[in-house]
Each structure stands twice: as C-alpha cells, then as structure tokens.
Image (tube, rainbow, N blue to C red):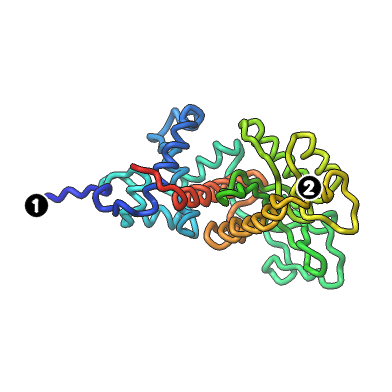
C-alpha cells in the first residue's frame, strides 16, 4: 500500500506561516545572485543557502534552542519541512550545514567553543569582589570581543554587545537592526542606520528617540538631511534645532508616544528570538543571527498587517 502525502495540502490555508513564507521567498529571490556564490563547488551536494537561511528564520520564530534541535525536528515536523520546501522523503539537514553557511557569510572560521577556563575553583569563575572592573582590566572568558556596558546609573556593568533598531512608526516594522561594540555611542549608530536607509532611497521625514540621542551634533546631522528631530529633550540642556518650533507640534508628541513601541522589538528578540543571551561568539557571528532574528520579527509583523495572497 502506497500513501502520497503533500505537505502543501496539510498546512491550513490561513496558517500565519504562509504569508511569512511568501515574503521570505520574495526577499531571497531578490538576492539570488549573491547567494549563488555561497554554493560549494566540490565535495558533497550543496544545501541551498536559501533553505538554511529560512531554517534560521524558523529558529527565531519558534524559539528553537539550537541548530541541532531544528535539524532533529525536521524528521517529524511537517510544518517545518513545508516551510523549507522539503518533500516527505528528502534527507534532513545537519547542524554542520548551518555552521558552514555562517563560515562563508562571515568569511572566518566557525567558533569552536570558549577558551580554556582558568578560574581558581575550576569553573572559570574568578572572584573580582572589591576590584574596579574596566575594559582595560577585565575580559570575557567566553567572548573576548564583548565589552563592559552599564545600562543605567546604579546598575552593574555587564560584558555584552549593544543592539540598535530602527523602527517604522506607522506600522511598527523593524526597518533596520545592528549589533555593535557596546562602547559605541547610540547617535553614531543611528546616523549609520539612517545612511544605510538613504542608500536604499528610503525617505525619512522624522526620527523619534529618547534622551540618549539629545546631542547637538546629532540634531545638526538630522537637520542637514532634512529629518525633523523628534527627540526627547533634556530640559536643562540647550540644543539648537530642538526647541519649541519643533516640540509644539502634534507630530512631535505623536512620535514620542510611538517611539516606545521599539521596546516591543527588543522584547520579542530577547524572549522569542533567543537574543537575551547570544549563542554565538564574536562581533561577526552574533550580528549575523541577530539580523536574521530581526528579519523574522519584520516578516511576522508584515504578515499580521497585510497577509500576502498565495
């Protein structure tokens, strides 16, 4: 007795992954030329980079704890096979496929694990009580590229990277995302994200942000590019270009209300996307997954706003 099962027929027509898959396929088709260069020319048959990148989207969307776990679920999860365009009898993936893709994307060796531990108790934990921690004296034993950063006054400094997001106020979409050295100033990263959008010919009319961006140089930079600075003001500071002529308008107050929604992006990336604690080592590999996770949030948001007909 033979039974023919089509994954396409088993997925409900109104399943939210249908719109996300359509959007993802469109985006990957647009960069197909660049992805063709990632195919291996020797050895075993190559796994399409498009399939592996979509696998990373699944990991972010469903909070899968690792590449290995994702590969295991492909053996019995029909939804995942359908999303990756895999037939019922197609061979599954191996976690090494994802590692090789990252190696090609970042043009460096795959991280093999943390350095040897040298803590006095054999666990790698060193007692720094009473010592002043600085980036010049302390280094992470698992990721030497991480830097000490304090989120606010009275809070402890932690070894980490910094995440930056650019959000579309109207729809709450994650328009751009970046992971940088924790010591880099937020206005400097924002200027770089704006420049990237300008290269894409995206018009930015205004920019809302918190008080951390209220700097004269940044306001001057926004004005030079015809972007209205809807930044939260520091009352005790005089900032040319950010006065009542800007703040008296309803559009400024609306931007101040809307900008808080960017915390939804960071909250989703930490709790669902798995970025509360990075699984990767280094400033090259961590942003690679972070950008894919941000893309997953963007696709999820798009699918909820306007489902794409398939």
**Residue 35 drawn above or below residue 109:** above
In the figure, is residue 76 to the left or right of 144?
A: left
Q: Position of residue 37 (x, y in %)?
A: 50, 28
Using the rendered view, name the quadrant where residue 241 is placed. Answer: top right
Element at label 1: loop
Residue on which the image places disc 1: 1
| Most distant residue in the left direction | 1
- Which numbered dot is residue 246? 2
Number of other residues with Cα within 10 Å of mark 2, as a class: few under 14, some 14 to 19, many 20 or more: some
- Give how far across and how far down residue 12 sits, in percent: 29, 54
Residue 93: percent from the left, percent from the top? 39, 47
Q: Quadrant of the C terminus?
A: top left
Residue 278 location, quadrant:
bottom right
Q: Position of residue 81 (x, y in %)?
A: 34, 49
What residue sits 60% from the left and 47% below the top? 168
Instruction: Report if residue 164 is visible in the image.
Output: yes
In this view of the protein, which residue sits in the foreground, 200 or 57? Answer: 200
Q: Residue at x 75, y 34 (%)?
A: 225
SS type, badge 2: helix
Of the pair 195 and 63, the residue shown nearer to us = 195
Q: Which label sits in the foreground, 1 or 2?
A: 2
- Would residue 79 be found to the left or right of residue 115 on screen? left
């Amino acid at each position: 007795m033979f039974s023919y099962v089509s994954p396409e027929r088993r997925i409900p027509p109104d399943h939210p992954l249908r719109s996300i898959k359509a959007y993802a396929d469109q985006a990957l088709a647009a960069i197909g030329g660049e992805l063709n260069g990632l195919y291996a020319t020797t050895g075993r048959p190559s796994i399409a980079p498009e399939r592996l990148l979509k696998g990373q989207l699944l990991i972010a969307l469903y909070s899968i704890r690792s590449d290995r776990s994702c590969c295991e679920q492909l053996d019995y999860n029909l939804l995942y096979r359908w999303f990756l365009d895999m037939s019922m009898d197609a061979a599954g993936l191996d976690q090494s496929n994802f590692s090789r893709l990252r190696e090609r994307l970042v043009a460096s060796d795959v991280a093999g694990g943390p350095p040897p531990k040298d803590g006095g108790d054999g666990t790698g934990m060193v007692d720094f009580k009473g010592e002043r921690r600085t980036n010049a004296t302390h280094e992470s034993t698992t990721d030497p590229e991480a830097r000490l950063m304090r989120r606010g006054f009275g809070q402890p400094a932690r070894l980490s990277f910094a995440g930056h997001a650019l959000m579309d106020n109207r729809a709450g979409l994650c328009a751009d995302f970046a992971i940088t050295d924790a010591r880099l100033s937020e206005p400097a990263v924002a200027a770089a994200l704006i420049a990237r959008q300008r290269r894409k010919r995206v018009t930015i009319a205004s920019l809302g942000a918190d008080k951390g961006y209220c700097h004269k140089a940044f306001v001057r930079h926004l004005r030079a590019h015809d972007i209205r600075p809807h930044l939260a003001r520091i009352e005790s500071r005089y900032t040319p270009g950010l006065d009542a002529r800007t703040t008296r308008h309803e559009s400024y107050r609306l931007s101040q209300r809307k900008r808080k929604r960017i915390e939804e992006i960071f909250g989703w990336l930490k709790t669902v996307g798995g970025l509360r604690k990075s699984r990767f080592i280094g400033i090259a590999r961590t942003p690679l997954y972070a950008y894919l996770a941000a893309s997953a949030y963007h696709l999820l948001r798009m699918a909820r706003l306007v489902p794409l007909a398939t």
